């Protein structure tokens, strides 16, 4: 045999397959139609919304029922309708004056909001813009207080405030806000201020502004979203707080809304659930209204502060 016959020849490349393409062995499943995906996602959201809103709607419906029919049905509405729960709950005598409770809660909330906004903004400006010794160490200690449970400092604080004679006043609830004890809001505003360009500070300094002028004329106007977020969370936390007022506000004249709601429940006697649900419905109005008014600032404050 000749060398030409024994030599191996290269095979010609196989022509591309022009027929129906083969499906991969572990290929992706065909995608569902956009209409079906949209229908499923909207159905899940609607069902979740109903499950979350049902307790609230049931409470509103129960506030218009007589006391003997409050727990008779799981439905949202019954045939019997009465507004006595609101009148009885609002003016329940000398001990249960809800107009006084709402005034106390509103006063306490406004003082806490102002104290938190001013003190946390000043502290955040110092950590974000100033340079001083042990700055990082002090900021780490401030953030570390977030890991400290509130109940750990509860007894020492009560002993201190009792020795100062601040029991039955708003001072134990307001003074800590003025001293910038909420590390979360400090961290929130520090992250926000750090994102502001320092060239604005330099321009203000050239115009003759000191640290106070830069803070008041530059930082504060640009930090409105972070301040709004601080105000919103402070409002909700203070308005819904029960443990703090229960410890320090023992006289009925100084009670807040949360304490007034708890007074409708009697472990030894008859509880007034109709009035309780009626006043609970009214107590939600300021929170919902404030949230709707400040929701734009809330979204901007969190989105621009590096919090996810």
Image: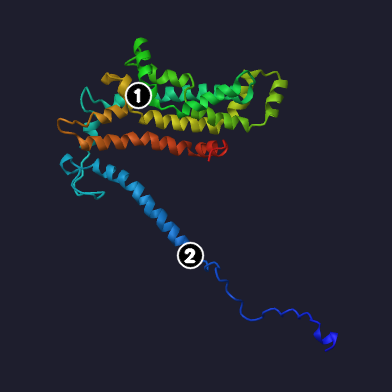
Q: Nearer the viewer, residue 51 or 13?
A: 13
Relative placement, left or right, of 125 versus 109 is right
Q: Position of residue 51 (x, y in %)?
A: 34, 50
Which tag, 2 or 1, sits closer to the chain's start? 2
Relative placement, left or right, of 64 versus 166 is left
Q: CA distance from mark 2 to mark 1?
A: 51 Å
Q: Say which residue label 1 marks.
A: 244
Q: In the rendered image, which quarter is residue 253 located in?
A: top left
Q: In the rendered image, which quarter is residue 291 located in?
A: top left
- 58 up-or-down from 3: above or below: above
Q: Secondary structure at mark 1?
A: helix
Q: Residue furthest bottom?
A: 1
How many numbered discs, if any?
2
Q: Position of residue 229 (x, y in %)?
A: 50, 33
- 169 up-or-down from 182: above or below: above
User: Residue shown at 20%/25% (left/top)?
Assistant: 93
Q: Say which residue label 2 marks.
A: 35
User: Residue shown at 23%/35% (left/top)?
Assistant: 275
Q: Nearer the viewer, residue 42 or 13?
A: 13
- 84 up-or-down from 182: above or below: below
Q: Secondary structure at mark 2?
A: helix
Q: Position of residue 184 (x, y in %)?
A: 49, 30
User: Residue shown at 68%/28% (left/top)?
Assistant: 198
Q: Position of residue 84 (x, y in %)?
A: 20, 36
Q: What's the mark number on residue 118?
A: none
Asked whether residue 269 is in view, the answer is: yes
Asked whether residue 222 is in view, the answer is: no
């Amino acid at each position: 045999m000749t060398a030409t016959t024994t030599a191996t020849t290269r095979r010609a490349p196989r022509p591309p397959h022009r027929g129906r393409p083969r499906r991969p062995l572990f290929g992706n499943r065909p995608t569902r139609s956009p209409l079906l995906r949209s229908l499923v996602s909207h159905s899940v959201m609607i069902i979740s919304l109903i499950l979350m809103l049902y307790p609230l709607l049931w409470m509103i419906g129960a506030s218009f029922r007589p006391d003997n029919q409050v727990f008779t049905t799981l439905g949202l509405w019954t045939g019997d309708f009465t507004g006595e729960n609101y009148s009885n709950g609002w003016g329940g005598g000398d001990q249960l004056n809800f107009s006084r409770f709402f005034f106390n809660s509103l006063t306490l909330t406004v003082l806490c909001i102002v104290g938190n906004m001013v003190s946390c903004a000043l502290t955040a400006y110092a950590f974000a813009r100033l340079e001083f010794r042990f700055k990082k160490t002090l900021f780490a200690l401030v953030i570390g207080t977030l890991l400290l449970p509130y109940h750990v400092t509860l007894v020492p604080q009560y002993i201190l405030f009792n020795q100062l004679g601040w029991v039955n006043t708003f001072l134990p609830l307001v003074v800590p806000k003025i001293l910038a004890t909420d590390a979360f809001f400090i961290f929130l505003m520090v992250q926000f201020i750090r994102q502001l360009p320092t060239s604005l500070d330099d321009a203000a300094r050239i115009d003759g502004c000191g640290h106070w002028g830069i803070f008041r004329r530059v930082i504060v106007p640009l930090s409105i979203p972070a301040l709004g977020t601080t105000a919103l969370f402070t409002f909700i936390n203070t308005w819904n707080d029960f443990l703090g007022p229960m410890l320090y506000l023992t006289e009925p004249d100084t009670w807040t809304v949360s304490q007034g709601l708890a007074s409708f429940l009697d472990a030894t006697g008859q509880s007034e659930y109709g009035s309780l649900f009626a006043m609970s419905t009214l107590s939600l109005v300021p929170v919902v209204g404030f949230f709707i008014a400040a929701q734009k600032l809330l979204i901007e404050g969190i989105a621009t502060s590096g919090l996810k």
